[in-house]
Image (cartoon, rainbow, N blue to C red):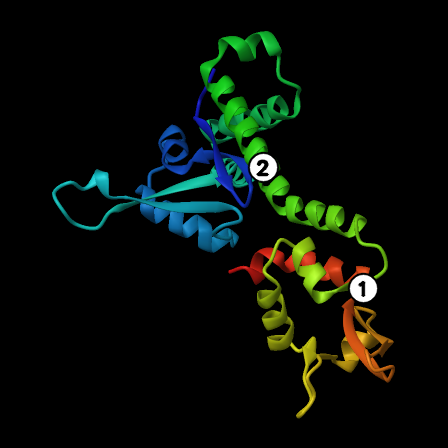
Amino acid sequence: MELIKITDLPTAGRHIPTADARELHGYMAVKDDFSTWMKRRIKKYEFTDGVDYWVFSDSAENPSGGRPTLEYKLTLDMAKELAMVENNDKGREARRYFIACEERAKSPPDPVKALNDPAVMRHLLLTYSERVLDLEQDVAELTPKAEALDRIATADGSECITDTAKALGMRPKDLFSWLSGNKWIHRRAGCAHWIAYQDKLMRGLLEHKVTEVTRGDGSTRISEQVRVTAKGIALLAEKTDRLLI
């Protein structure tokens, strides 16, 4: 027998069983008007909004104007305490009812009854849908990291910036621009080639490759190239989507 309707209140990512305060007030035949009774009980027993109860404004109760009525949803613990302090037969009966509701909630649902109860089925479907949405969000967040790992798996040693851009699915000039703007690489005055910032070298994200190049006339020159390590590619791969914005 349902003395007072119990409804699930979705809050903070979970569903909390709650009782309607106005129904409880009416069932216990409290002499004070509802608003006065509710405010006094909250103040006297130091109940906390958003923890023990939730307040909702119901303007539909006053279609002709005036202040909207306030409705309260109570946790079963608060409802039990209110029923107990009322200290009458109806209050004690309400308290036993809330205890029984808690016990039923802890028991595993009967699958046969669930299939025949639209309310239970609706709750189960909503819970399932929320879990599916959570999983889809997890997949969306993990996919870029998985793709990043896949790209890194193909990296052997270090790569030049142009080849790194190709591996990341970017235009080389966009990657050069980002690396320069975010202080990964820079050019000294009068120097044509790029140089890695010291902190990126120390972190193992970039490295310098120095080679000796022989000219056609037999003379040689030193060529210095910034290359991106596998660790650097890993970090850039996670940022790829943001780099393209």
Q: Amino acid at mark 1?
A: Thr
Q: Is residue 7 left or right of residue 163?
A: left
Residues packed near mark 1 inside 10 Å, few (<14), some (14 to 19) or many (20 plus): many
The residue identified by callout 2 is: 136
Q: Is residue 113 left or right of residue 165?
A: left
Residues packed near mark 2 inside 10 Å, few (<14), some (14 to 19) or many (20 plus): few
Q: Amino acid at mark 2?
A: Glu
Q: Say whether residue 155 is visible.
A: yes
Q: Quadrant of residue 14?
A: top right
Query: At 62% from the left edge and 12% from the top edge, which residue is drawn?
Result: 110
Query: At 47% from the left edge and 52% from the top edge, which residue is drawn?
Result: 49
Q: Which mark is residue 229?
A: 1
Give above or below for 178 relative to 36.
below
Give above or below for 29 relative to 164.
above
Q: Is residue 185 left or right of residue 1?
A: right
- Circles 2 and 1 in contact, beta carbons < 8 Å: no
Instruction: Please provide percent x and percent y for residue 231.
Output: 80, 61
Along the line of sight, the residue nearer the viewer: 178 or 211: 211
Query: Element at badge 1?
Result: loop
Query: Element at badge 2?
Result: helix
Instruction: Please provide percent x and percent y for residue 138.
Output: 63, 42
Query: At 66% from the left edge and 56% from the top edge, which residue is drawn?
Result: 166
Instruction: Please provide percent x and percent y for residue 208.
Output: 82, 75
> CA separation, marks 2 and 1?
32 Å
Q: Residue furthest front?
A: 217
In front of the other: label 2 or label 1? 1
